[in-house]
Image (spheres, rainbow, N blue to C red):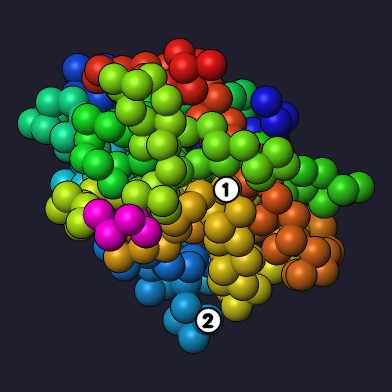
Amino acid sequence: MYSGYLTDIEGIIVGHSESLEGLTGCTVIICEEGATGGVDVRGSAPGTRETDVFKAEKMIDKVHGVVLAGGSAFGLDASSGVMKYLEEHGIGFDVGVTKVPIVASAVIFDLAVGDYRIRPDFNMGYNAAKNANTTENRQGCVGCGMGATVGKILGPKNAMKSGLGSATIEIGELKVSAMVVVNSFGDVYDYKTNKQIAGVYDYNGKQMLNTLDIFKGEYNPVDLSMKNTTIGVIGTNAILNKAEGNKIAQMAHNGFARSINPIHTMFDGDTIFTMATNKVIADVSLVGTIATEAMSMAITNAIVSSKSHGGLLSFKDIE
């Protein structure tokens, strides 16, 4: 629906690996030369790795990879496979005897969608890194998007299938791109039309319901702790330092708020990373504002590109 992909940013490559049986997977974003990083965690139930290195006062100023994975906390293991692949190819922070790749990660909960015994691990992470290339442009049920679902206030049986999306905005030489895996507690809206495109679904009545209305009706939701999370990456060729990278990630959460309602709840672990390749001088506020729009575009793409799986319908099958 909206154009562009994270690989539009020169120096950034993307790779996916997934399991159809497990309905899970991982997505790897690599910058071999190292990108200035940033992160902002807004949800209250996150699963992350190496987020502290993005703090402005920390010594490390470059990140070589970001992993978005399913499998809940088990999925953090995929980062080890990515590190192994990058080390084998001489990518990382030079410590003399070897190079140590700086690889951050965030995970979604998808254990209840497919076979919970299959989850992103070392091998899946390694394969995703091995698959990374400059021409990757798949969206929907691919990589980490394989097990993503949305609208879970009435439990997983009333959820809809979601996935991974990406979009890019270019202004002159400046490029800002977003990639996101939408696995939210709330409903999803196209930010331009404000039309609900996914969320809690009445499979008997064949209609979408409104999560916020159900919430306001004093409905006590099922146990959803740590079972939702929307995670993503902002890639840009703008020249940024770490403090500015963190600001971009912070502003990009406005894209979540425009497109998902409710968002940043106690049931979500929403996390956004920034990767800047430092090629073009740009105003930080402009980059952040563009990142917000690109993120909303990517969220819509994640919904409209997905296919029905695991007994859950996608946008394509209810339209």
Which residue position is annotated with label 2?
56
The picture quadrant where one finds residue 166 is top right
Q: Main secondary structure of the magenta part?
A: loop
Tell which residue pokes out farthest to the top in this image. 317
Residue 267 percent across, percent down from the top left: 28, 58
Name the quadrant containing residue 193: top right
Q: Which amino acid lies under the numbered mark 1 shown in the image of this protein?
A: Ser
Residue 107 among magenta residues: no
> Residue at 42% across / 17% down in the picture?
307
Relative to 219, is 177 above or below? above
Mark 1 closeness class: few <14, some 14–19, many ≥20 residues within 10 Å: many
Sooner in the amino-acid sequence: mark 2 or mark 1: 2
Magenta-drawn segment: 215-219
Report how many numbered discs are placed on residues in the image: 2
Can you say whether 113 is above or below 104 in the image? above
Which residue is pictured at 16% across the width and 35% down the height? 112
Residue 111 on image: x %, y %: 17, 37
Residue denoted by label 1: 259
Under tag 1, what secondary structure? helix
| Residue 24 image-quadrant placement | top left
Residue 128, position in %: x, y? Answer: 37, 31
Q: Residue flagged by tag 2: what amino acid is it?
A: Ala
- Any magenta on residue 217? yes
